[in-house]
Amino acid sequence: MSDHWQYLLLLGACLAITAPLEFFGSGVYRQPLRLLNAVLPVMAVFLIWDEVAVAAGVWRYDARYISGLTVPFRVPIEEVLFFVVIPICGLLTYNAVSTILDWRTRR
């Protein structure tokens, strides 16, 4: 397997592992507007932050571990997806844990 796909495969694994958590509580994917309101502002801030760090030479993207697919401003697609996938996984986890704790306190 090529190292160039590791980042994308890792992001896919994160989504796959947390996908069953959607069935706890009110769900995350079932509330798309709420999901977008939570993810998009944070994604925008951190993409800008990353690009400033890259331009300043503080941060770089290791070409060995990315696919080579980019979006405008030569940002690797993996970096954009990171700022979508990881918050979604966090929201799924938070929603599931909150629901389970709520079930426990109702007993």
Image: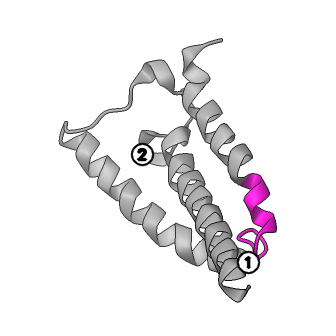
Q: Position of residue 3 (x, y in %)?
A: 55, 16
Quarter of the rendering containing residue 12: top right
Give the residue at mark 1.
Answer: 31
Quarter of the rendering containing residue 89: bottom right
Please state the extent of the stretch shown in magenta in the rendering: 19-30
Visible residue check, residue 67: no
For the residue marked with disc 1, what is the amino acid? Gln
User: Can residue 71 be found in the magenta stretch?
Assistant: no
In screen coordinates, is 54 left or right of 68? left
Badge 1 element: loop
Q: Give the mark nearest the N terminus, 2 or 1.
A: 1
* Front-most of residues 74 and 64: 64
Q: Quadrant of the N terminus?
A: top right
Quarter of the rendering containing residue 42: bottom left
Q: Nearer the viewer, mark 2 or mark 1?
A: 1
For the residue marked with disc 2, what is the amino acid? Phe
Q: Position of residue 57 (x, y in %)?
A: 19, 36
How many C-alpha atoms fall within 10 Å of the one at disc 1: few (<14), some, or many (≥20)?
A: few
* Front-most of residues 14 and 48: 14
- Residue 56 vs 85, above or below: the answer is above
Give the residue at mark 2.
Answer: 73
In screen coordinates, is 17 left or right of 7? right
Visible residue check, residue 7: yes
- Residue 2 vs 71, above or below: the answer is above
Question: Which color scheme did the rendering employ for the protein?
Answer: one colour
Which numbered disc covers residue 1? none
Q: Residue at x 75, y 54 (%)?
A: 19
Asked whether disc 2 touches disc 1, contact meaning CB atoms under 8 Å apart, the reply is no
